């Protein structure tokens, strides 16, 4: 018997944003592997073994999951958002490439999920309604000068931008520097959206002109979206609508 | 009584990729508005009025939907993929901004969906596992020189790239030119993924080195993903795995 490995996206938090495809894979799993809070989202059931691990051990976790699948288990690696966007899928494939040949023969599937930037964008309106880019602001896995270079080129291309991992306790200065670079490179008051814990009970959305943004407006659970030069705000009672028109001059 | 307008993402095609949140909104709607094939995906039911319209009438469709909501109806505008990514949400907000003040007071919500690039990426592995951008290659709503400029800057930033609307019958030459620009700007044999009709019975995935790409490999139902300079291929029996590692030197 050959096992299987599914890398499944749980979406940003709400159960109503988990696709039926992912729910079905979880219902058939013998083993669920992932970061502690994501594994906790999967209901206990007889015959299901949960393997929860801490953050920043993505490669170890991947090897563990691949080993279980190679033993014949039906393994689901759970990821928040979409597994292919700054999440578990790339880590699993890094482990596959470096691992034993048998791992390549496994039945491995990635099940997409609602990634944080799209959940955040939906709450604000349609800020990513025209060309955009997604950048991981964490410098754990890449040098800071590369991040800065990408920010400048993204501004030059006039992309709207989505930032994952804008700010962590261990690297509070990175996001401050990113805001400086953006103010220099954009030179205008385009809207920035701080979307915290979208679709959970702690959700908070804030729209701030770029020059007024402060590093402490983001934390580890915040997605930051920056409009392009064309992004517009529709004022109204309550939260404004932020959207980027489909056309560009 | 005040109506409501929900702009809902149906995902790339398979019902297993429609979120429960969207299914629930459709179950409560009095009116469904959208492009013919998307409206056709919503099951008929007593009390539900379907308003299907042709492609390229997004603003008319938006005004129609807003008018119905203003009359007190519970309207769902259906969009394929995610409504905020090259789809209906920006069109609705363009209509809101230009329309009567009463439209701003409406209860308008965007419900995210699985966008085509993430469904396509999941099928291939994790080609968008590092920083990436999304570009609409259609020049219906923006001038071609802007598209070309963005392609060159995206290559310079070493983003992986996702292209929506790579090729249509009315503009067959645009994608050929895009491939020329990419070959010039990238200068290597990075993998390109042609993902057609993902999650439907007509799904076809093809991985081709950039220099071997031909315009006719894409049609209107194809998403094109281009790896970054770091994107890797894991060869194995069957389809290869394409992924972009999380780290960059």
Image (cartoon, coloured by chain):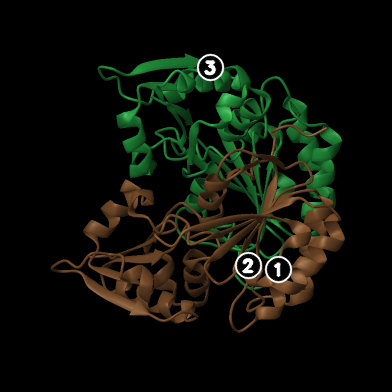
Chain colours: A green, B brown
Residue at 30% across / 31% down in the picture?
A: A27
Please state which of the two labelled residues, at mark 3 or mark 1, is closer to the viewer. 1
Residue bearing the label numbered 1: B214
Q: In the picture provided, is A95 more to the left or to the right than A13?
A: right
| Chain under callout 2 | B
Do the numbered discs 3 and 1 sit on residues whose CB atoms are within 8 Å?
no
Residue at 71% across / 49% down in the picture?
A: B227
Residue bearing the label numbered 3: A64
| Chain under callout 1 | B
Q: Quarter of the image containing the C terminus of chain A?
A: bottom right
> In the image, which disc is placed on residue B217?
2
**Are the residues under marks 2 and 3 on the same chain?**
no
Q: For label 2, count other residues whose C-alpha is less than 10 Å away and answer few (under 14), some (14-19) or many (20+).
A: some
| Chain under callout 3 | A
Q: Residue furthest bottom?
A: B170
Does residue A220 appear anywhere in the picture? Answer: no
Depth check, front residue: B157 or B14: B14
Report how far apart the C-alphas of labels 2 and 1 lie in the structure.
6 Å
Depth check, front residue: B249 or A199: B249
Does residue B215 appear anywhere in the picture? Answer: yes
Do the numbered discs 2 and 1 sit on residues whose CB atoms are within 8 Å?
yes
């Amino acid at each position: 018997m050959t096992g299987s490995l599914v890398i499944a996206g749980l979406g940003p938090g709400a159960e109503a944003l988990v696709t039926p495809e992912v729910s079905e894979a979880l219902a058939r799993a013998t083993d669920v592997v992932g970061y502690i809070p994501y594994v906790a989202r999967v209901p206990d059931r007889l015959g299901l073994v949960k393997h929860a691990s801490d953050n920043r051990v993505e490669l170890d976790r991947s090897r563990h999951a691949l080993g279980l699948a190679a033993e014949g288990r039906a393994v689901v690696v759970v990821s928040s958002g979409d597994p292919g966007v700054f999440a578990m899928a790339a880590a699993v494939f890094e482990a596959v490439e470096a691992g034993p040949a048998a791992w390549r023969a496994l039945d491995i599937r990635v099940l997409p999920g609602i990634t944080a930037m799209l959940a955040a964008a939906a709450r604000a309106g349609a800020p990513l309604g025209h060309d955009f880019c997604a950048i991981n602001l964490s410098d754990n896995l890449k040098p800071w000068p590369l991040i800065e270079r990408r920010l400048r080129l993204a501004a030059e291309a006039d992309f709207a931008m989505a930032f994952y991992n804008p700010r962590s306790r261990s690297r509070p200065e990175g996001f401050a520097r990113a805001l400086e670079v953006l103010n220099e490179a954009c030179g205008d008051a385009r809207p920035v959206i701080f979307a915290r814990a979208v679709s959970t009970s702690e959700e908070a959305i804030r729209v701030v002109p770029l020059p007024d943004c402060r590093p402490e407006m983001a934390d580890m659970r915040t997605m930051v979206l920056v409009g392009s030069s064309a992004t517009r705000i529709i004022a109204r009672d309550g939260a404004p609508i932020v959207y980027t028109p489909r056309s560009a001059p």
